[in-house]
Image: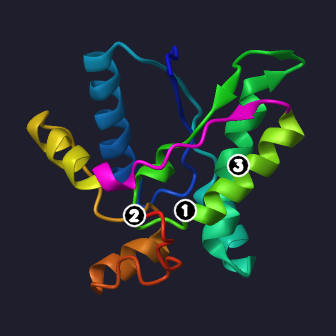
């Protein structure tokens, strides 16, 4: 596959604010190294995101829908701006991979923009090493205050669904 790649920074879930700065700085450095342009959406109210996540029966599902909906919506604004979308969430073995894929496929139909599914979890450790060699910041938790608390307790990934037979 040959694509012109554009990034989208939309992460209202990241807590604390300093963590967001570290991640955004790493994104900008990576984009500069790779010649990637990105759309950067300023963070909305952390309290608004937090209240909605707490009210949800599944905070991760809420977060995936929120962020992927914004991504798909930005691809199609009356005229199609981008032909397809994907997500870096698919790179992590700590994410609910099947849930992400299902949400993205539903949003793909809703917004009439193709979702590109690529399972790159097997290259996760290799990618982390490349990030380290480039001197880029690499987060230790998904982003929200809840995942940070789980990471701090050594519970990273416990909420993630069982890996499928594809792994």
How far separated are the C-alphas under marks 2 and 1? 8 Å
Q: In which quadrant will I find the C terminus?
A: bottom left
Q: Is residue 74 visible?
A: yes
What label does residue 97 carry, if any?
Answer: 1
In the rendered structure, which disc, 1 or 3, sits on the residue that comes first in sequence?
A: 1
Secondary structure type for disc 1: helix
- Which image quadrant for residue 84? top right
Q: Which residue is mark 2?
A: 93
Percent x, y for residue 140?
Answer: 28, 63
In magenta, the rendered stretch is: 112-123
137 versus 82 height, above or below: below
In the rendered structure, which disc, 2 or 3, sits on the residue that comes first in sequence?
A: 2
Secondary structure type for disc 3: helix
Percent x, y for residue 117?
Answer: 59, 43
Position of 124 with respect to 36 (left or right) is: left
Q: How many marks?
A: 3
Secondary structure type for disc 2: loop
Percent x, y for residue 111?
Answer: 85, 35
How far separated are the C-alphas under marks 1 and 3? 11 Å
Mark 2 and mark 1 residues within 8 Å of each other at the beta carbon: yes
Position of 100 with respect to 5 (left or right) is: right
114 versus 151 height, above or below: above
Disc 1 packing (10 Å; few <14; some 14–19; many ≥20): many
What label does residue 104 carry, if any?
Answer: 3
26 versus 147 height, above or below: above
123 versus 163 height, above or below: above
Q: Is residue 105 magenta?
A: no
Residue found at x 85% / y 41%:
109
Percent x, y for residue 158?
Answer: 42, 84
Q: 66 and 91: which one is in front?
A: 91
- Which image quadrant for residue 125? bottom left
């Amino acid at each position: 596959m040959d694509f012109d790649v554009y990034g989208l920074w939309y992460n209202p879930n990241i807590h604390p604010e300093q963590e967001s700065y570290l991640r955004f700085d790493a994104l900008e450095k990576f984009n500069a190294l790779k010649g990637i342009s990105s759309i950067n959406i300023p963070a909305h109210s952390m309290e608004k995101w937090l209240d909605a996540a707490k009210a949800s029966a599944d905070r991760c599902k809420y977060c995936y829908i929120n962020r992927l909906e914004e991504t798909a919506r930005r691809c199609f604004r009356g005229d199609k701006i981008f032909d397809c979308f994907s997500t870096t969430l698919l790179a992590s073995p700590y994410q609910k991979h099947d849930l992400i894929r299902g949400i993205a496929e539903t949003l793909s139909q809703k917004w009439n923009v193709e979702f590109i599914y690529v399972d790159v979890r097997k290259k996760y450790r290799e990618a982390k090493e490349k990030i380290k060699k480039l001197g880029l910041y690499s987060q230790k938790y998904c982003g929200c205050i809840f995942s940070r608390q789980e990471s701090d307790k050594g519970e990273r990934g416990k909420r993630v669904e069982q890996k499928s037979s594809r792994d």
